[in-house]
């Protein structure tokens, strides 16, 4: 499920270098005990090892130049519990614990000794910061300073007694290069207590934030932000629903790796971790609770940016689908905890050998947009146990760093595209309904499109999968999901706050959502709204992460108070039907056309070099109107619910949204066109379609069904191209039924090609005549040189001419005077006489129908008379 890339190996990157350097020492035994101590911001790795002559040394590995450097050497064996290096690499903070390997103890006789060491060349002064009987974690702040002329470092001391101190260390230069502490005897007076009574703490080095839990009447999670001027303040507070006896000892998360801590992760009643992104779009608080002697596991993901909490209860019992004679699975170990891994906007909840739950923190309303795998499908590619994996903060949101504590290896982990495609392409098990795999396919499809969709090669693979699975699945339509999810990804990258306003799935269009998309077998989910994060103090004045997070939570609260804030594409259908039923142009026709022109300007910019599929080459008035109407309705929706963006940005967003919709349709067609190696000959109506062309028509018709179900516009020319394939692929009577049931739309371009390209064989003649009966554009008749079209032209001409003469001068006869009179077939001599009289009186009697005159009507009437009397075959 994960694609792991090896970035660091303690044995090859560090120990091999140590062996090479220590080999010259006579007393060197050839064995080293190397341990990772801390990973600083920027990826610098601090480690210790036992060198020759019973020494303990601390070094650093720089991932940029892949070099090792000795920082400090203790001339005796000591147990380093925690270590941190300041940004200027002039100070080293070290926390030592009692040496358990012998009877010798550190002096003074304290359980933990915290030292601050000057390690700049020529200076190895040591200052004792604390000598206490509890564990101490040390961590330097890594911040940009306002003034580079001031030399200072700032050190956090976090103790097992439940408090955090911040030391401000002033530095000075001596002899031009030595960096030493200015007043080492006054260090204790610079310390300030910033946290008291904590039971859990997590340090985020990339963002310089401290998260901690404190308990009074209930558990409160607080966030402390450190600023570039080295001040700090509590910016957020969140109440968590945790059991009273949640923490037996204080948990230090991402604050070094204490190999001497006797407590194991399995023995902790609760495990908790906070994950954020850089911009403020997401903040997730994840914690798990194990029920001892139970077959269930509880874990909760608090989506602070969505102002909601989702509590999951997973059954760890046997799989109900297993045969009855299969041996029962081994009971799970007591106090089993999952591993939480953040990748992008997904939180992976992993229990080795049992299940993997990829929780979608952005689209969380329905479980079908989160991927749940169990049994044999669970495989992260990690060899170590979950308890031996530590999640490290990463600079990139699309990846996460994982440390295997036992082997000393660090991996860069990303979601595996190949594995997700495998899930997408999986077939239903024999004898099981497709609905059991549909939710997994839907979740995998959204992960590929929304999270990884910027890869054009991946998009081509998904389109190929769509082509191979043309028919909709039992629970969802893959083409609709492809269109909406792709559009959502593009627009969400443009602006925040669109999660609950734009459609990202066709599931919301369904009146009755299939049960398989709303539940996961063996998993129950409880959603709690309004978790109530409180932004405090300077949070309301902050820029960046906290201001965006605060705005996201407030926007979510507002949208949750509305009945249906999400734009439903099918809601435009009523306006669209009303628009088409109006005989006269509506008042806002000009405005709608202006919207369409804006969209086409963007499409032309994107697609000026693409002419493979003949789209955008004709004026499809209906599609142009639907395009403009879609822009209008979507713009109106966003302005109503998201005025913060401004009208100009919303207008640009909406125009690009609709333009990208048209481009997605074109892109799908071009991909399938190239796959089947189709050329311009497919547009010829004179030959039957090949199997490849039939497949192309089937795919085009599925796109047509999907877009009509969502009432989405199509590129001008799509209906023409679809009708061309239909007339070549389908029997003529089936083609006409498709038209009658409005599955196909006849365009003027298609009908004109039909009249000119096909000959007048009996089958083609019947087809043309049947098509002519189904259209209202009379100018099409002029394109078919045939007695039927000539007769129709003559009848329309005579009817129009006589109606005009009746309105101006009146007729010399009426229907009652001549009961046998029918304007459709007038006696030839009388028609000729009437037309001659009109021609003589009119200045330009054929102004509107220049290709029709009395002689043509007379010849046509004579020919039609012969046909009706049976004297001519045609």
Image (cartoon, grey):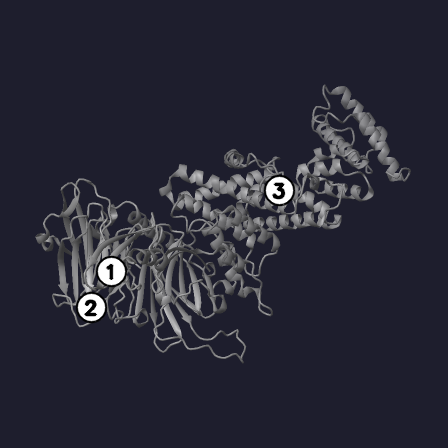
> Is 504 drawn above or below residue 298 in the view shown?
above
Residue 590 percent location from the top left of the image:
52, 33
Label ID, residue 641:
none
Residue 216 percent location from the top left of the image:
20, 66
Frontmost of labels 1 and 2 is: 2
| Side (left or right) of 721 relative to 479 | right
Residue found at x 15% / y 40%: 176
Q: 786 or 20, which is in the foreground?
A: 20
* Residue under pointer 1: 212
* Residue under pointer 3: 718
Helix, strand or loop at label 1? It is: strand
Task: Tell whether label 3 touches label 2 (CB within 8 Å).
Answer: no
Task: Tell whether label 1 touches label 3 (CB within 8 Å).
Answer: no
Label ID, residue 99:
2
Report, in whole angstroms, how far the alpha carbon at label 2 lies from the one at label 3: 78 Å
Residue 685 percent location from the top left of the image:
73, 41
Q: Residue furthest left?
A: 185
Q: Residue furthest front?
A: 26
Helix, strand or loop at label 2? It is: loop
Q: Residue furthest right?
A: 871
Q: 758 or 609, which is in the foreground?
A: 609
* Among the 4 quarters of the image, the one containing residue 405: bottom left
């Amino acid at each position: 499920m994960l694609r792991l890339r090896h970035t660091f190996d303690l044995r090859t990157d560090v120990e091999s270098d140590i062996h090479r350097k220590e080999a010259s020492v006579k007393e060197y035994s050839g064995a080293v005990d190397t341990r990772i101590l801390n990973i600083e911001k920027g990826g610098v790795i601090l480690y210790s090892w036992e060198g020759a002559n019973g020494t303990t040394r601390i070094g650093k590995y720089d991932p940029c130049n892949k070099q090792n450097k000795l920082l400090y050497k203790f001339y005796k064996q000591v147990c380093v519990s925690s270590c941190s290096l300041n940004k200027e690499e002039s100070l080293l903070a070290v926390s030592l614990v009692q040496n358990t390997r012998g009877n010798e103890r550190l002096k003074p006789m304290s359980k933990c000794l915290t030292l601050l060491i000057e390690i700049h060349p020529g200076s190895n002064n040591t200052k004792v910061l604390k000598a206490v009987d509890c564990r101490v974690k040390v961590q330097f702040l890594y911040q940009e300073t306002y003034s580079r002329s001031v030399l200072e470092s700032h050190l956090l001391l976090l103790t097992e007694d439940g408090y955090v101190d911040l030391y401000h260390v002033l530095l000075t230069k001596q002899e031009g290069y030595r960096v030493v502490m200015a007043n080492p005897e006054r260090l204790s007076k610079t310390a300030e207590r910033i946290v008291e009574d904590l039971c859990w703490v997590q340090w985020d080095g990339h963002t310089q934030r401290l998260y901690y839990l404190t308990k009074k009447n209930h558990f409160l999670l607080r966030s402390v932000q450190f600023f570039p001027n080295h001040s700090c303040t509590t910016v957020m507070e969140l109440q968590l629903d945790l059991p009273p006896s949640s923490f037996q000892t204080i948990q230090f998360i991402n604050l070094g790796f204490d190999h001497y801590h006797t407590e194991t992760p399995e023995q902790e009643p609760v495990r908790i971790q906070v994950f954020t992104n850089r911009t403020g779009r997401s903040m997730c608080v994840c914690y798990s609770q194990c029920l001892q002697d139970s077959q269930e596991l509880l874990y909760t993901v608090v989506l602070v940016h969505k102002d909601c909490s989702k509590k999951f209860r997973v059954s760890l019992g046997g799989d109900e689908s297993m045969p009855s004679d299969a041996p029962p699975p081994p009971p799970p170990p007591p106090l089993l905890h999952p591993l939480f891994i953040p990748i992008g906007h997904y939180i992976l909840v992993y229990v080795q050998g049992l299940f993997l739950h990829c929780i979608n923190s952005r689209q969380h309303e329905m479980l079908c947009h989160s991927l749940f795998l169990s049994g044999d499908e669970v495989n992260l590619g990690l060899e170590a146990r979950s308890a031996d994996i530590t999640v490290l903060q990463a600079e990139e949101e699309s990846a996460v760093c994982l440390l295997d504590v036992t082997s000393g290896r660090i991996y860069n982990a990303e979601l595996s595209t190949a594995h997700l495609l495998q899930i997408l392409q999986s077939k239903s098990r024999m004898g099981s309904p497709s609905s059991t795999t549909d939710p997994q396919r839907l979740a995998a499809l959204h992960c590929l499109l929304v999270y990884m969709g910027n890869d054009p090669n991946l998009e081509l693979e998904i389109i190929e999968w769509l082509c191979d699975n043309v028919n909709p699945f039992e629970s969802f339509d893959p083409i609709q999901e492809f269109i909406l999810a792709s559009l959502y990804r593009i627009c969400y990258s443009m602006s925040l706050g669109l999660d609950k306003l734009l459609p990202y799935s066709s599931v919301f269009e369904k009146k009755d959502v299939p049960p398989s998309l709303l539940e996961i077998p063996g998993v129950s989910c409880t959603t709690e709204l309004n978790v109530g994060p409180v932004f405090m103090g300077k949070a309301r004045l902050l820029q960046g992460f906290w201001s965006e997070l605060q705005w996201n939570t407030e926007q979510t609260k507002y949208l949750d108070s509305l009945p249906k804030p999400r734009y439903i594409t099918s809601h435009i259908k009523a306006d669209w039907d009303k628009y088409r039923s109006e005989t006269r142009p509506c008042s806002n026709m000009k405005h709608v056309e202006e919207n369409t022109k804006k969209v086409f300007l963007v499409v032309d910019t994107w697609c000026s070099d693409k002419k493979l599929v003949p789209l955008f080459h004709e004026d499809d008035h209906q599609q142009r109107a639907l395009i403009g109407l879609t822009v209008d309705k979507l713009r109106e929706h966003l302005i109503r619910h998201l005025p913060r963006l401004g009208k100009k940005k919303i207008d640009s967003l909406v125009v690009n949204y609709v333009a990208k919709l048209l481009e997605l349709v074109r892109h799908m067609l071009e991909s399938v066109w190239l796959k089947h190696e189709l050329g311009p000959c497919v547009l010829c109506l004179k030959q039957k379609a090949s199997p490849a062309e039939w497949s192309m028509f089937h795919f085009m018709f599925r796109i047509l069904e999907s877009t009509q179900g969502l009432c989405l516009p199509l590129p001008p020319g799509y209906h023409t191209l679809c009708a061309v394939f239909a007339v070549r692929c389908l029997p003529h009577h089936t083609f006409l039924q498709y038209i009658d049931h409005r599955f196909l739309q006849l365009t003027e371009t298609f009908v004109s090609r039909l009249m000119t390209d096909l000959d007048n064989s009996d089958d083609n003649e019947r087809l043309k005549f049947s098509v002519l009966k189904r259209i209202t554009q009379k100018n099409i008749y002029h394109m078919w040189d045939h007695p039927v079209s000539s007769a129709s032209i003559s009848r329309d001409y005579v009817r129009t001419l006589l109606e005009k003469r009746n309105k101006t001068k009146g007729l010399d006869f009426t229907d009652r005077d001549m009961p046998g009179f029918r304007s459709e077939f007038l006696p030839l001599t009388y028609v000729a006489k009437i037309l001659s009289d009109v021609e003589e009186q009119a200045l330009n009697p054929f102004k509107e129908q220049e290709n029709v005159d009395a002689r043509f009507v007379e010849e046509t009437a004579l020919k039609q008379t012969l046909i009706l009397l049976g004297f001519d075959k045609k």
